[in-house]
Amino acid sequence: MFTKEDLNAEILSNVEVAPGHYLMALSVSRVFRDAQPGQFVMLRPGGRGVPFLGRPLGIYSLADHDEGARIEILYRAAGRGTQVISTLCEGDRMEILGPLGNRFDLPPDMDTAVLVAGGIGIAPLVFLAQQLSCRSAGVRVVVYIGARDAATLLGLDRVKVCSAEVRLSTDDGSAGYRGPVTDLFREDLGSFDAVKTAVFACGPNPMLKRMSEIVADHPISCQVLMEERMACGMGACLGCTIEVRTRQGVQYRQVCSDGPVFDLREIVWR
């Protein structure tokens, strides 16, 4: 059970780091010290009334802070809720629920981790890259980052600190490969040892659907973090339902409580 203290956060900073993209640091309770890459939080400005629902946002980084923890959230001000959040300042209070959801699974025999990020999907993958750098000595980390243009390529400084190999793509060709990040990944796929390589991806659903097509006839494992609209974050509202393949046939799952991390090959794309 969450205590009242666990449900409160204080903004330490909230700055625009790229056009329409913000990095927010929060002081949170010690329950977040056990947060894992792939998990997320539901954030809601303190004192705001209904119908302002919490927004699901991935964890970008984690560190101990005083008696609690410090987390960072990298987000895009895309709708009314995140636009309101982007106006908050140091010292403002937030209502927070988390850490929620499952985590990325790290295969014990993995010697190469390939991270594929589209747009703001880089946020949870930076957290994963940091964990791989700290806890998995000898694991090669290759990070593919795609964005609309050079100005919205995010997380480069963080993944470089993790000694990752970074490969960039932009839709307009202003940095790195010109075209979708999935095309860049597809060109390199054959160079990875499928037995000892694991792929981790996050981005918009069309990107993840394309990833499923690319690896369909390849034995490499791939986990994806799904981005879906959520109202509760705990599986009660059924607003983030997706279809997955199981041994019993196609069944429904909730991204918030059963995910947000899934085996890419289990997801039914429409």
Image (spheres, grey):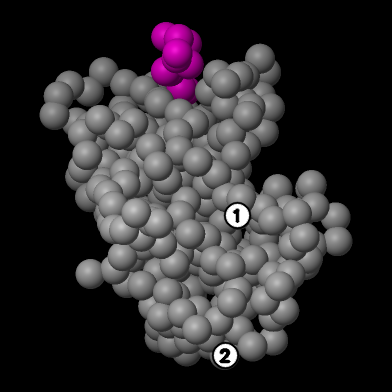
Q: Which of the pair 34/17 is nearer the observer?
A: 34
Whether residue 41 is visible here, answered yes or no, is yes
Give SS at disc 1. Answer: helix
Q: Is residue 149 at least partly visible in the picture?
A: no
Are dots 2 and 1 in contact, CB under 8 Å? Answer: no
Q: Quadrant of residue 116?
A: bottom right
- Region in magenta: 1-10
Most extreme residue toward the top is 4
Amino acid at dot 1: Val
* Residue labelled with disc 1: 126
Q: Which mark is residue 187?
A: 2
Query: Which of the marked residues, 2 or 1, is nearer the chain's N terminus?
Result: 1
Please give the name of the residue rendered at 31% of the width and 44% of the height, measured from the top-left corner.
Answer: 254
Q: Is residue 8 magenta?
A: yes
Circle 1 packing at 10 Å, graded few (<14), some (14-19), many (20+), is: many
Q: Tell which of 215 and 160 is nearer to you.
A: 215
Question: Is 1 positioned to the left or the right of 143 in the image?
Answer: left
Which percent across, then down, holds residue 70? 60, 30
Quadrant containing the N terminus in the rendered view: top left
The residue most toward the front is: 248
Q: Is 139 on the left or on the right of 248, as rendered?
A: right
Quarter of the rendering containing residue 180: bottom left
In percent of the image, x 14 and y 24: which residue is there?
Answer: 50
User: Which-is-in-front pick, marks 2 and 1?
Assistant: 2
